[in-house]
Image (cartoon, rainbow, N blue to C red):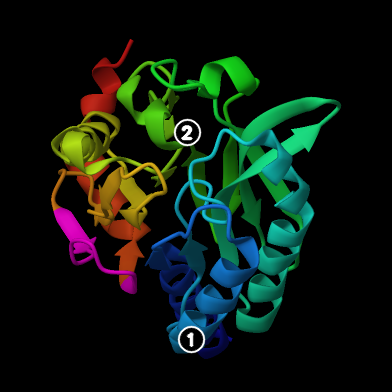
């Protein structure tokens, strides 16, 4: 009987270790503006090389169309969502990314999280970029989204949101923090890329969380340059994995939640959060 219990305990330990891992692939896409079919065709070819152990694939903000103010492009939202579902089903992975979406006559910069079983959750970008036309043409989301996947709690935000620390603040609930991983699909221009790098590290450190910022690369139709800088950072703000500047590519890394929890226990800054 003791031998049986020992075997069960060992099996449970192995399962818990497996569940503590999260294998992430960032897709730093060179999105061609408003060329949805061309983008999907190219992405599909690149994804033939997706690491088969990937648990979560993350696209940039508005990866179908580029960061567009042409609300007519929202007509592609269902096709984009089907594309994400096809990837999830074919590769048995979760897929995340932002798509311009229309609902009830309003337009949203909507980040979708598609589970491997094809169930879907979404987050509507809260902080719309008022320096551009985004805040005039789109509707801001009002709700935060924290979801659970593979025993990880994940907070989803979009691009400009990462500038606002109070919006992404982790919360201590009797020693259990709201999220372990912050995901930020982005279209962050090269002229402000230092801010992107700095904000990713800042949010990781202050929230004692992993952070994945997935940015696009390339040049859009208006001449704006996007240099990428997609990166996953750990709870100390150190880079775990990073894409090459300006390259369209897949970047894979493996994260360990147990490592995160050990750090939180050893250095419990979260106890002093208000």
Secondary element under disc 2, as helix, strand or loop, is: loop
Examine the rendered structure and indicate whether residue 255 appears above or below residue 226.
below
Question: Taking 158 as reference, is 270 left or right?
Answer: left
**Is label 1 in contact with label 2 (beta carbons under 8 Å)?**
no
Q: Residues within 10 Å of mark 2 (few under 14, many from 20)?
A: some
Q: Which residue is rendered at x = 48% and y = 36% of the image?
A: 157
**Residue tagged by mark 2?**
178
Q: Which residues are magenta?
A: 239-252
Q: Which residue is rendered at x = 39% and y = 49% of the image?
A: 220
Q: Quadrant of the C terminus?
A: top left
Examine the rendered structure and indicate whether residue 91 appears above or below residue 102.
below
Question: Taking 15 as reference, is 91 left or right?
Answer: right
Res. 142 in view = no
Question: Taking 233 as reference, is 261 left or right?
Answer: right
Q: Which residue is rendered at x = 52% and y = 55% of the image?
A: 63
Q: Where is residue 198, by image quadrant?
A: top left
Q: Where is residue 258, by image quadrant?
A: bottom left
Q: Where is residue 189, by image quadrant?
A: top left
Q: Which residue is rendered at x = 73% and y = 53% of the image?
A: 76
**Residue tagged by mark 1?**
52
């Amino acid at each position: 009987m003791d031998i049986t219990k020992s075997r069960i305990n060992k099996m449970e330990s192995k399962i818990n270790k497996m569940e503590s891992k999260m294998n992430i692939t960032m897709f730093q896409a060179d999105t061609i503006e408003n060329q949805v079919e061309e983008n999907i065709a190219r992405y599909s070819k690149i994804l033939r090389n997706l690491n088969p152990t990937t648990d979560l694939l993350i696209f940039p903000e508005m990866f179908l169309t580029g960061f567009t103010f042409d609300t007519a492009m929202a007509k592609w939202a269902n096709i984009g969502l089907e594309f994400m579902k096809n990837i999830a089903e074919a590769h048995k992975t979760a897929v995340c990314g932002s798509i311009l979406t229309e609902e009830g006559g309003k337009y949203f910069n909507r980040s979708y999280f598609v589970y491997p079983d094809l169930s879907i959750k979404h987050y509507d970008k809260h902080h719309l970029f008022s320096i551009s036309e985004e805040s005039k043409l789109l509707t801001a989301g009002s709700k935060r989204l924290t979801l659970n996947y593979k025993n990880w709690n994940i907070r989803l935000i979009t691009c400009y949101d990462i500038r606002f620390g109070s919006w992404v603040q982790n919360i201590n609930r009797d020693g259990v923090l709201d999220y372990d991983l912050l995901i930020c699909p982005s279209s962050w221009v090269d002229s402000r890329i230092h801010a992107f790098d700095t904000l990713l590290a800042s949010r990781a450190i202050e929230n004692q969380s992993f952070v994945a910022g997935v940015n696009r690369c390339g040049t859009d139709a208006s001449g704006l340059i996007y240099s990428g800088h997609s990166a996953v950072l750990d709870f100390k703000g150190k880079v775990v994995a990073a894409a090459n500047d300006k390259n369209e590519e897949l970047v894979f890394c493996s994260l360990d939640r147990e490592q995160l929890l050990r750090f939180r226990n050893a250095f419990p800054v979260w106890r002093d959060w208000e």
